[in-house]
Structure formats: C-alpha cells, structure tokens
Amino acid sequence: ETGVTQSPTHLIKTRGQQVTLRCSSQSGHNTVSWYQQALGQGPQFIFQYYREEENGRGNFPPRFSGLQFPNYSSELNVNALELDDSALYLCASSSGTGSHYEQYFGPGTRLTVT
Amino acid sequence: GQNIDQPTEMTATEGAIVQINCTYQTSGFNGLFWYQQHAGEAPTFLSYNVLDGLEEKGRFSSFLSRSKGYSYLLLKELQMKDSASYLCAVKDTGRRALTFGSGTRLQVQP
C-alpha cells in the first residue's frame, strides 16, 4: 500500500448532478495529481496541485475543478455530470513535481453516472 | 503533444520471459515510467528510466532508447500473479504530470 487514500470507493450519480472526490496524500508529499481512467484505457491527467496552487491542467473542461488544503489533501469536484464522466478517478501524490519524483497512486474512486 | 503506443494484449506461460514494448513521441523527454495495474486496483510503480540503457530490479528490467523513442519492460520467471495491465508513461519537460499509454494486458497461463 502507498499511504494514499481516497474516498468514497464507489459512487453512483445521476447526469447533471455534482460530485466531490477526496484524496489524502502520503505523509511528506506536497503534490497531488488527479487522473481519470476509463475502462480499458490508461489514466488521463486532469490537473495537479502543488502547495495549494494548481500547477498544470490536462484537456478537461472547467466543470472539473479542484482544491488542495494546507495538509496537502485534495478534492476533485465535477459539476454537471455527464455519462462519459463514468470512470475510475485516481489521485497520485509525490514529494515534488520533477520527473524523478515517483507518483504514488491511491486506490481510486469508481464513479458511475446514470 | 505526446503519443504513446503499446500492444493491447499479450499472453505468456508461467516461468517464461516476456517483453512488453512501448514507443513514444514527445516534444521534450523527461523520463519514462512503467506501472503495473491489477484489475480494479491502483497502478503501482515498477521502474523509471531517464538515460539510455537497462535498469534491472529483481525479475523486472526496463530499457530505454531516447533516440528511437523506445522502451521495453522485461519480466522474467513469470508468475501467475504477474497477470495484470502494464502501463508505459512518459513525462516531458512541458508538462507537470505523466502521459500514459493505454496499457498492455498480460495474461500468464499455467
């Protein structure tokens, strides 16, 4: 286990609703990255937070937003849910943003939108 | 942008050796990672290459050729528990996070 935790484990929402997913980073890690993984695909980068500031964003619309707190835990918020948002949402923490900083993944939140 | 290609599926026999290839195109290479992901679980880190050559870690080895945009993951003495998806991921100098391939699903048979 990596020490990265996510909640909830599973979630079912209806199209148009809003959802908040949570991630607690590994002790000593100040960087959290969020990924979306559709079935049979690799994870796709949503955004990264470093010391409470957004530090890069992938090709996701503004209805995907996030926060990082002083203890470096993080939230992913998705508004106006669409069916295509159904996926496994992974967060990964690291102790920096450089390439040599290994990312440790949490177990993920499985979101189903109906 | 980035483009990462790896085979969709592979099958191998317990005790054998398997090589999973990954080719990539990136504007500014800054490291290549291999992750293992069992069904329904989080990816776990296997290896990191930033310079050309072979990195060995127990039964797993990873090779990188930056000039060819090519990497492979070599798994020796295959065990049934090695049945999983193997993800190749690249970091480039212009991005903050990893770009993943679609993964190679490896099935180890008795």
Image: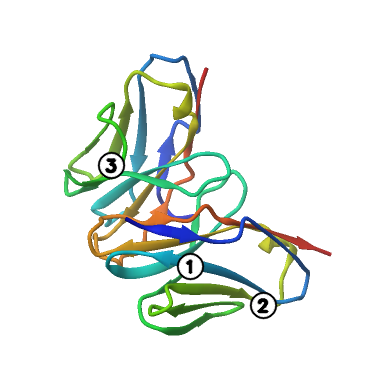
Q: Which of the colour schemes (rainbow, by chain, secondary structure, one colour) is used?
A: rainbow
Mark 1 vs mark 3, foreground winner is: 1
> Is residue A110 visible to the viewer in this orientation of the structure?
no
Q: Which labelled disc corresponds to residue B23?
A: 1
Residue A108 is left or right of residue A60, and the answer is right
Q: In this view, does B9 lie above or below A106?
A: below
Tag 2 and tag 1, C-beta contact below 8 Å: no
Separation of marks 2 and 3 at Cα, in angstroms:
38 Å
* Residue extending farthest right: B110
Tell me the residue at 78%/70% (across/down). Answer: B14
Which residue carries the number 3 mark?
A73
Q: In this view, does B61 lie above or below B5?
A: below
In the image, what residue type sits under mark 2?
A: Lys
> Is residue A29 visible to the viewer in this orientation of the structure?
yes
Instruction: Look at the numbered disc 2 and give the secondary structure of its residue.
Output: loop
The disc, 2 or 1, on the residue closer to the chain's N-terminal end is 1
In the image, what residue type sits under mark 1?
A: Thr
In the image, what residue type sits under mark 3?
A: Ser
Instruction: Look at the numbered disc 3 and give the secondary structure of its residue.
Output: loop
Which residue carries the number 2 mark?
B76
Residue A38 is left or right of residue A45, and the answer is right
Q: Where is residue B6 in the image (x, y as percent from the top left)?
A: 55, 61
User: Label 3: chain?
Assistant: A
Instruction: Look at the numbered disc 1 and give the secondary structure of its residue.
Output: strand
Residue A70 is left or right of residue A93, and the answer is left
Tag 2 and tag 3, C-beta contact below 8 Å: no
User: Label 2: chain?
Assistant: B
Foreground of the two, B42 or B26: B26
Q: Where is residue B3 in the image (x, y as percent from the top left)?
A: 41, 58
